[in-house]
Amino acid sequence: MSTPQPDAHRPSDARAGDDRATPDDLLHSRTGTEVSAEDLVLAAGRDVTPENLDWARHKLAEEGPAAIDKLLP
């Protein structure tokens, strides 16, 4: 026979604030540090290969560090 747990169906007060979405102006994909070609390759979900590193270097040269923002939420 199971014993009902009090308030098991309601979120705790500590978790109640977790149900809200994070405002867009608080979302960040970069830490403020330099973005490397390897960072960009990994953010794109690609393997780190010479070809993919060349792709990332070219993309960084064209778009700068903002290139990673297009790949990450």
Image (cartoon, rainbow, N blue to C red):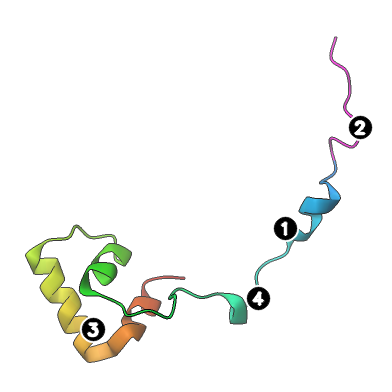
The one nearer the camera, 29 or 32, is 32
Image quarter of residue 58: bottom left
Decide: few, some or many residues near mark 2? Use Cα within 10 Å; few <14, some 14-19, many ≥20. Answer: few
The one nearer the camera, 36 or 42, is 36
Horizontal arrangement in the rendering, residue 34 relative to residue 50 (left or right): right
Residue type, label 3: Leu
Q: Marks 1 and 4, how far apart in space?
A: 13 Å
Q: Which callout, 4 or 3, points at the residue further toward the start of the chain?
A: 4
Question: Is residue 2 within the magenta segment?
Answer: yes
Residue 6: which disc? 2
Q: Which callout, 3 or 2, points at the residue further toward the start of the chain?
A: 2
With respect to residue 5, does 32 lie above or below? Answer: below
Q: Marks 3 and 2, how far apart in space?
A: 55 Å
Give the image location of residue 46, x and y in percent: 23, 60
Bounds of the magenta segment = 1-9
Decide: few, some or many residues near mark 3? Use Cα within 10 Å; few <14, some 14-19, many ≥20. Answer: some
With respect to residue 12, does 18 lie above or below? Answer: below
Q: Marks 4 and 3, how far apart in space?
A: 28 Å
- Residue under the point 77% across and 52% down: 15
Residue that mark 4 sits on = 23
Residue 60: which disc? 3
Residue 18: which disc? 1
In contact (CB < 8 Å): disc 4 and disc 2: no
Q: Marks 4 and 2, how far apart in space?
A: 33 Å
Q: Marks 1 and 3, how far apart in space?
A: 35 Å
**Magenta region's main secondary structure?**
loop
Residue type, label 4: Pro
